[in-house]
Image (tube, helix red, strand yellow):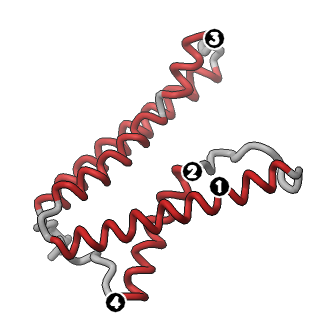
Amino acid sequence: MPATIKNPAARRYTLRLFVLMTAYVLLLIFAKWMFKRGFAEGALGYVLAVLPALPIIGVFWAVMRLLVEQTDEYLRMLLVRQCLFATGFALVVTTIREWLQNFDMIAAGDAGFGAAFFWFAGLGLGALFNKLTIGDAGWDGGCK
């Protein structure tokens, strides 16, 4: 039997995430298709290159919206800890990577592994940090 999300804030977040990730996949496919066929010249190229980033920016908004809409103070605290961990993790990784690039220890460019990627990875690590330090990651707080 599939889990149902009982927490209204978590349910809205899940729906937003689904919509944003669907838009991300569609916009990424479209932008790559346009670039491969040579339709991405001039200003249109810049617009097409930025399109897939917009839903990713939307995910940041969705996470912050979840913080605002979460009425359970304990679950909100767990999410705040996750976000703080994710922010610190992304800043540490990208700072080290940039210094390694500055001294030509690694190649310039990130091949898609920019700050957003590391922030999202940090969210998962932040949940693990919560589990290891206070015994709860909050994963089952809105599901039954």
Picture quadrant where residue 14 is located: bottom left
Q: Amino acid at mark 3?
A: Glu
Residues packed near mark 3 inside 10 Å, few (<14), some (14 to 19) or many (20 plus): few
Residue at image mark 4: 135
> What separation in Å lies between label 1 and label 3 (alpha carbons)?
30 Å
What's the mark number on residue 94?
1
Counting from the top left corner in percent of width and height, residue 50 is at 52, 28
**Mark 2 element type:** helix
* Mark closer to the chain start, 4 or 3: 3
Dot 4: within a 10 Å radius of its alpha carbon, few (fewer than 14), some, or many (20 or more) residues? few
* Residue on which the image places disc 2: 115
Q: Of callouts 2 and 3, which one flags the residue occurring earlier in the amino acid sequence?
A: 3
> Does 57 sit above or below residue 10?
above
Nearer-N-terminus badge (1/2): 1
* SS category of the residue bearing label 1: helix
At x 67% / y 56%, what residue is drawn? 95
* Location of residue 55 in the rendering, given as x and y in whole percent from the top left corner: 39, 38
Kindly identify the amino acid type of the residue bearing the numbered disc 1. Answer: Thr
Frontmost of labels 1 and 3 is: 1
Which image quarter is the N terminus in?
Answer: bottom left
The residue carrying mark 3 is: 41
Q: Secondary structure at mark 3?
A: loop
Q: CA distance from mark 2 to mark 3?
A: 27 Å
Whole-angstrom CA distance, mark 1 to mark 2, is 6 Å
Q: Are marks 1 and 4 in contact (CB under 8 Å)?
A: no
Mark 1 or mark 3: name the one nearer the start of the chain.
3
| Foreground tag (2 vs 3) | 2
- As shown in the figure, which amino acid type bears the numbered disc 4? Gly
29 or 96: nearer the eye? 96
Query: Is 87 positioned to the left or the right of 103 in the image?
Result: left
